[in-house]
Amino acid sequence: MGAFFPSRWRLCKCQCVLNNLSTSPFVFSHAIAISRGVHIEPVRPLAFDLHEPTASKTSEPNQAPIIFLHGLFGSKKNNRGISKALVRDLGTPVYALDLRNHGESPHHQRHDYRVMARDVLTFIQDHSLRNVAVIGHSMGAKTAMALALFWPEMVASLVSVDNAPVNVALNQDFAKYIHGMIEIQAANVTRQAEADRILQKYETSLPIRQFLLGNLYRPKGEDAQRFRVPLDILARSLDHLGDFPYADPSKRSFEKPALFVRGTKSRYITHEMLPTIKEAFRKAVVDFLIVSRSGAV
């Protein structure tokens, strides 16, 4: 959620780092992945949309497939437009994922960056992908960073939108949104307009309300609408979503191309965080975007 970045701007910046990938081959090692993810049971299968180039525009043999990861309360559908644009312009397949407890992916009681990164690793393995470029926004950005730092041999490059590899408390708006969504579900609303009237008590911004209400659906055989996201699990997990599991850059680093995109008003990538970003992601480029509102998870 948070900043609503212009698609064309995002596309240009993503292309900049994706077109300068290191394409050296690596050994696709399941054994290495298992040894580093001890006692973490992945959620599978993650739901995804695959956007593929036409036969007339295929990528170079070593061009990295792209994996897109959304933010809190988001889903794969949020990245549909930019995914199609990247496929068109780069000629490489794009996998837009639903992370655990979001969209059409399975629910699980544990929701933190270690397990979400492990889920994405398992997805990469299950689909026999290699040299992947990972683009993540907010919660998806920290998931992408955790993946790159813990399994760097699986990742060719990284784009992090509006998040940094640091521990930072979440905006209190997220707890407020969950309270509003719980009230909506308890009211057994049958129309989105009813849900929006309730949510107006918690959020004045129409685009943000529309984003949150995009999670509503009507289960088969029922009149009342429900949220796809498990509100109880996410409510319990909010405190952990401000954390980062590898916040000490002296212990792990990623030596391949990385682009960090921040809004000038963002509290999730501040000037004080730049040295930590550069230490953990040695080839990082940090770029700025002027937006009216930024920050999400």
Image: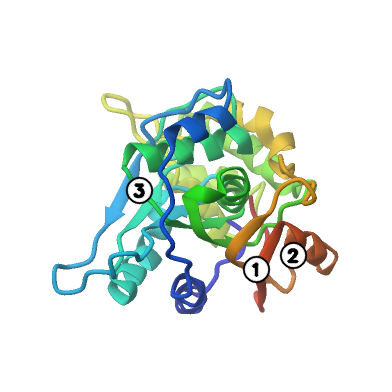
Q: Is residue 98 visible?
A: yes
Instruction: Classify residue 17 as left or right of residue 262.
Output: left
Q: Earlier in the sequence, mark 3 or mark 1?
A: 3
Residue 102 position within the rendered picture, expressed as x and y whole percent measured from the top left: 47, 38
Question: 19 or 9: nearer the eye?
Answer: 19
Residue 72 position within the rendered picture, expressed as x and y whole percent measured from the top left: 57, 46
Residue 147 position within the rendered picture, expressed as x and y whole percent measured from the top left: 56, 45
Q: Earlier in the sequence, mark 2 or mark 1?
A: 2
Instruction: Classify residue 240 as left or right of residue 147.
Output: right
Instruction: Classify residue 126 as left or right of residue 136.
Output: left
Residue name at image x 32 percent, y 43 percent? 128
Residue that carries the numbered disc 1 in the rendered image = 283
Asked if 107 appears above or below 279 in the picture, the reply is above
- Amino acid type at circle 1 is Lys
Kindly identify which numbered label has been placed on residue 139. none
Question: 246 or 264: nearer the eye?
Answer: 246
Residue name at image x 76 percent, y 45 percent? 251
Judged from this view, the residue extending furthest toward the left is 55
**Callout 3 secondary element:** loop
Residue 55 position within the rendered picture, expressed as x and y whole percent measured from the top left: 14, 68
Residue that carries the numbered disc 3 in the rendered image = 129
- Amino acid type at circle 3 is Leu
Residue name at image x 31 percent, y 42 percent? 127
Residue that carries the numbered disc 2 in the rendered image = 278
Residue name at image x 40 percent, y 67 percent? 82
- Amino acid type at circle 2 is Lys
Marks 2 and 3: CB-CB under 8 Å? Answer: no
Marks 2/3: CA–CA distance: 27 Å
